[in-house]
Amino acid sequence: MEKSGLNLKATELRLGLPGSESPERGSDKNGNAAVILSLKSFVGSGAKRVFCDATDADAKWVFSVSEAAAGRLFSPRGGGSSNNNNNNHGKVHVGAQVVGWPPIRSYRKNTMSSQSSKNDDDSEAKLGLGCLYVKVSMDGAPYLRKVDLKMYSSYIDLSSALEKMFSCFTIGQCSSHNVPSRDGLSESRLMDLLHGSEYVLTYEDKDGDWMLVGDVPWE
Amino acid sequence: MSYSSLPEDVLEHVFSFVQSDKDRNVISLVCKSWYEIERWCRRRIFVGNCYAVSPRMAIRRFPEVRSVELKGKPHFADFNLVPEGWGGYVYPWIRAMAGGYPWLEELKLKRMVVTDESLELIAKSLKNFKVLVLSSCEGFSTHGLAAIAADCKNLKELDLWESDVEDPSGNWLSKFPDTCTSLVSLNIACLGSEVSFSALERLVVRCPNLRTLRLNRAVPLEKLAHLLRQAPQLVELGTGTYSADLRPDIFSNLAGAFSGCKELKSLSGFWDVVPAYLPAVYSVCSGLTTLNLSYATIQSPDLIKLVSQCPKLQCLWVLDYIEDSGLEALAATCKDLRELRVFPSEPFGDEPNVSLTEQGLVLVSEGCPKLESVLYFCRRMSNDALVTIAKNRPSMIRFRLCIIDPQTPDYLTLEPLDVGFGAIVQHCKDLRRLSLSGLLTDRVFEYIGTYAKKLEMLSVAFAGESDLGLHHVLSGCDSLRKLEIMDCPFGDKALLANAAKLETMRSLWMSSCSVSFEACKLLGQKMPRLNVEVIDESGPPDSRPELPVKKLYIYRTVTGRRIDMPGFVWNVGEDSALRLS
């Protein structure tokens, strides 16, 4: 590998499965693809060595992708878009997939993932670490609520939970529940046979269309 | 009259004023008679690595101990780097202490595997048992807790700090007999399922000395007021879930209850927090010294309102929702702040979700003259900021910075952060603990080796360029006790050249580095008082000697190889024989 100057091609971050070889790329004795990481390019400080150059020739340091069985995985985020950015030459993006990084205790991860996530005015559903929160509004209610859809196993569960949540506002009049809603408006009214009250669950899908809850199977 | 002719009981009385382990150890080295006197009157021992010494040896040397503190797994076990079944079992210690320390009063464990059997043995054998602290432990269930509750007649403290507890039956709390009135501290915050509220309430009512109560999430907010009114003497409170339907009666009840707690100094909990209920605690804010909001998903404006009312705050744990603006308010109000921990709300996201940058930390370092302990998760940093922080706070003792994306450079200059961290170690001469992150070359380690003379614990990830980095640290850091490294290009040379240093340390962890199996063998052979343990779940490491060792844990010990190693841990010892499978 060339060592002079900033060798962008050789230092470009590419991910290969064990056993695969990318062209022009060295591989270690076992024929595993060596994922070569580079330090970010230093403006004005000349070319720095990349990690694998700096170690002994015998013990080529690779990110452990070549030993995938060991359970260390990572993937570049943004589909490798971090490569060849102005400021991001081959920067390592190791996100949630790297074991041990960032250094957050499992207790914290578990606790955070089972809580309501932050209210973000522009988002309809916020994916936490294993939850699916959606905003629910009821016409005329002073504030919205959030529900974790993963807590319910059927539409009936969800509907009774929502009814309980909004019961303090229902005075028996016809009103509509919208799941979820940006501006809290609903249109249709249908009698709900199960609960004998007049409300209907609707939701806005990703195309922006209002859909009646129940058509699509719960899963 | 010379010191050596002082009667034993006088010496013993003098020694009793010396509490610190280090000083006690020094006393025991003065002469044989002082060694003897001291060992008979030592009342507490701390074993930082449970495998460094055997329980029998500890009991033989110090026969009259009343308080034992043990730590098990390496620190990186917190981040899932240590496989299940690695070790850290407390049972052998408890079995030995059941016979050797029948009057044991306190047991504090961290990162250990505790079984119900162990807890039952404690309850059965230790008649004066008073204090049980299980911090980040696992392996036990509420059955074990029931035994403790039922049989430890003088129990004062039960603290399950962030432990992983199997929760099959909810009713262990009811096992505290009606005659139990001695509780001072109860922390059940980590328990998943509901405890019987009436049992809890009765317990609280009959324990007038209760100062610390940390509830679990299952305790509803509507019931908190009721509990508080039964225990207005509380000094430390962890709420349960902090959410309820918005009702004025619930709010005023809660606010009234809080205002009755005149001694409250520490608050925690606040799961599922509904901001509208936060003002209920305002009445206690002026006295608060510790605030743990690290699970509270409250936004910056609400946080600012809260924190601005706590001028006596010394310790704040909070999520990064506080943002730079909140930290600015903190710096302006809390002039007594000693410790700040800012945790990430969305560590696995690609983009920052909050406006928390290096600026927040700089502001706090400027505004809080007593700041000495920092844990800060953020997404960008600059050398300038670090230099400023270092110059502002030369009294810093613990500095742990986690820039979430590995190898992130100075965002202003794109340079490594060597100079910034270099300033930290240069200015903060009493620094004891340091965690590095961001883009770092060997230079930062040169700074650390040169200046960090009081450094005891160093955590490193994705840093350095060569063995020289590791060599700087091992040869330069005179006070180093614990070194933990992941994903750095450190290999054999530095390790072998500094083998003797390893015996002066508690432990060294290296994972995903460049250490060869051959070097591990050499080290194990050269250093009989080290356990060199290779962790490899995919098979015997000597079957692929050309590959670097995946995980390496080296620690000093006087008891030789441990006998409870699982199949994926190999002790590469003096006979260099691997375990037969």
Image (spheres, helix red, strand yellow):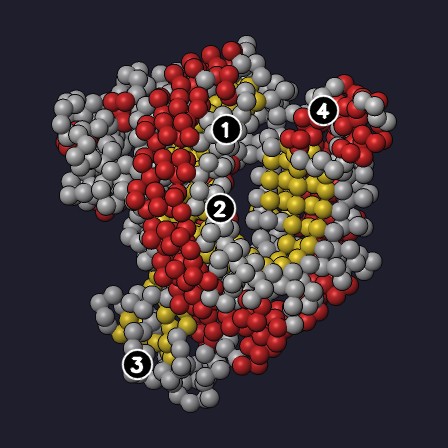
Is the Cβ of the residue at disc 4 closer than 8 Å to that at disc 1?
Answer: no
x then y, percent, for residue A89:
19, 38
Circle 1 residues within 10 Å: few <14, some 14–19, many ≥20: many
- Secondary structure found at label 2: strand
Q: Residue B28 carries which label?
A: 4
A5 left or right of B61 in image = left
The label number, if any, that marks residue B373 in the structure image = 2
Q: To which residue does mark 3 refer? A: A185
| Host chain of mark 1 | B
Q: Which amino acid type corresponds to the residue marked 1 in the rendered image?
A: Leu
How many residues crowd mark 3 within 10 Å: few (<14), some (14–19), many (20+)?
some
Closer-to-camera residue (B529/B472): B472
Name the amino acid, label 4. Answer: Ser
Residue B197, image x, y percentages:
67, 65
Mark 4 falls on what kind of element?
A: helix
- In primary-sequence order, the first of circles 4 and 2 is 4
Circle 1 residue: B480
Residue flagged by tag 3: what amino acid is it? Leu
Pointer 4 and pointer 3 on the same chain = no
Label 4 to label 3: alpha-carbon separation? 78 Å
- Say which chain tag 2 marks: B
